[in-house]
Image (tube, rainbow, N blue to C red):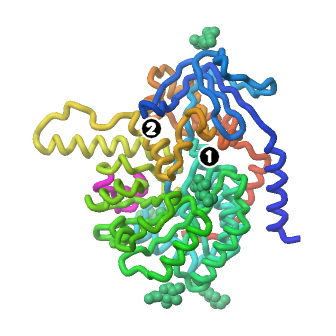
Amino acid sequence: MHTKQLGVLSRLAVLATSASASTILFSGGTVIAFNRESNLLEVIRNGSVLVEDDRITSIYEGSVPPSSVSIPTDVEEVDITNKILTPGFIDTHRHGWQTAYKTLGSNTSLVDYFNRFGEFATAAEYPYGKDEVYYSQLAGLYEALNAGVTTTLDHAHHTFSDETSEAGLEASIDSGARVFWAYAFHVLANYSLEEQFANYRDIASRASYDGSPTTLGVAYDSFGPNPNITVINTLLDLIRESNASVLTTHSVQGPFGITNSPEDFQALSLFDKLPPTTPVVFSHASFLSPVGAQLLRTHKHTISITPESEMHYGHTHPTSHLIQDFASLGVDTHFTFSTDILTQTRLWLQSVRRLLYSQVLDRWQVPVNNPMSANQAFLLATRNGGLSLRREDLGVIAPGAKADLVIWDGASPGMLGWRDPVAAVILHANVGDVEGVLVDGKWKKKDRRIVDEKYDEVRERFLEMRGGCRTG
Ligand SMILES: *[C@@H]1O[C@H](CO)[C@@H](O)[C@H](O)[C@H]1NC(C)=O
Ligand SMILES: *[C@@H]1O[C@H](CO)[C@@H](O)[C@H](O)[C@H]1NC(C)=O
Ligand SMILES: *[C@@H]1O[C@H](CO)[C@@H](O)[C@H](O)[C@H]1NC(C)=O
Ligand SMILES: *[C@@H]1O[C@H](CO)[C@@H](O)[C@H](O)[C@H]1NC(C)=O
Ligand SMILES: *[C@@H]1O[C@H](CO)[C@@H](O)[C@H](O)[C@H]1NC(C)=O
Ligand SMILES: [Zn+2]
């Protein structure tokens, strides 16, 4: 039997055993819930949250459930006194396979990145094998889960061969994280687009991710200028056939000329041709134009702002603060900088403040109002990510939402003394304060440790594999 078949079988076994109903009741702590009527965050002190299987089924104040709620006798009770319960963070742009390059890109510009670490440089000079991709992707997803990131839109450009493509998908499924795994189609010397299309169809028909939180999407970076219409029509077919959960593209306009802009999509009539269940995420959208912003609002697609990467690599985000209503946050190449959305959120919040304050100061006036709140930043990192993926059930604590949750230690030295839990998380917490993480109602981090009996082995194998990758 092939190892791949074994992998699928063991995964089925895991799914079968976890299929029996599991119920968790969190109580006694502060819950940052979302009120769907007001569309605002709602803080519940001494709150209780009931999770049944993969969903949040009930939220109430105090420890006595309302009469309509029955708590099963075999419930796992979790006391969250002095803790803060939030939805998991959502990262709408990342390349998980690059974990093996950690710290090697500390000085890179975007041009250096392409020449040394990008998909084409890697494919041409230091091709990863399936184990390199698998362990790099898995270690990277554990890094994200550890930091309270429960959903990742992975622009998966480790598609160098059938084997490496499938290894990255398999690692995503095995991590238990909610991965929107977007197969990247690209022109490579030794792996033709036709082979990639066939591989995608094969992956979609086998649907090994069914029953896991991972879904299949598409990534492509040549919508403009000079798009290949034959390729784009094939991608549309693939998206329709597979009911792709997302389409994503790198858009860096201005002097960079990597347009992939909303205007390019409009010129190709893609906003009309895409199925309504396939949202588009334009990563970075640096130098987005007013026309592009209007197209996003009309067709309800979004950008992923990756604050640290856009500053690190130099493409920046000159207009992104003007489209925060159709935006979410991402990390991008986590091998070069912070892996977590909390840091991205804080960087973004303070850079927007600085930018908007400067506009007042430029008129020799004194800014009186703070232009962006901690609550707005919290929503960008959570609910807006869900909306980018057209998923009302992600990024919120509300009845019916997916149970993707983070427990923060509100009594840590850095958090102690908080009154506003949103400000405590956004402005005072750090990744070390993440005590517990659940995805789909299943523990992924508990008592500050990754929940996976094979995690030590994953770490060892990852370090071994890393040796075979580029070192400079
Ligand atoms: C939480 O609510 C319960 C009643 O439902 C009460 O007994 C308990 O004292 C409350 N805890 C705090 C810290 O207020
Ligand atoms: C960063 O730049 C310094 C100075 O140019 C250089 O010595 C160092 O090797 C660079 N580090 C990496 C990881 O490229
Ligand atoms: C493509 O395959 C050929 C033959 O196996 C090999 O010699 C060459 O190095 C490969 N090129 C790349 C870019 O991987
Ligand atoms: C477009 O892509 C197809 C499929 O890979 C290829 O056969 C064709 O030559 C490309 N057309 C152009 C104009 O590059
Ligand atoms: C397509 O996927 C969406 C979620 O992305 C789901 O709601 C819908 O039911 C799916 N449609 C089909 C035909 O499978
Ligand atoms: Zn990227």
Is residue 166 a member of the stretch shown in magenta? no
Query: Which residue sits furthest right?
Result: 1
Mark 2 CB lies closer than 8 A to ligand 1: no
Image quarter for ligand 3 equals bottom right
Mark 1 surroundings within 10 Å by alpha-carbon count, few (fewer than 14), some (14 through 19), many (20 or more):
many
Instruction: Tell me: residue 84, above or below residue 186.
Output: above
Mark 2: amino acid: Phe
Is residue 308 a member of the stretch shown in magenta? yes
**Quarter location, residue 371:** top left
Q: Mark 2 — residue?
A: 378
The structure residue drawn at horizontal position 73% and vertical position 62%, both measured from the top left corner, is 208
Q: Position of residue 457 (x, y in %)?
A: 77, 54
Q: Position of residue 279 (x, y in %)?
A: 48, 58
Q: Nearer the viewer, residue 188 or 202?
A: 202
Instruction: Tell me: residue 46, above or below residue 369.
Output: above
The structure residue drawn at horizontal position 43% and vertical position 62%, both measured from the top left corner, is 107
Instruction: Tell me: residue 324, above or below residue 35.
Output: below
Q: Is residue 291 left or right of residue 429?
A: left
Q: Is residue 251 left or right of residue 175?
A: left
The structure residue drawn at horizontal position 47% and vertical position 22%, both measured from the top left corner, is 418
- Give the numbered dot on residue 278: none
Looking at the rendered structure, the secondary structure element under dot 2 is: helix
Magenta-colored span: 306-320
Q: Mark 1 — residue?
A: 145
- Can I make out residue 340 in this image? no
Q: Is residue 274 left or right of residue 10?
A: left
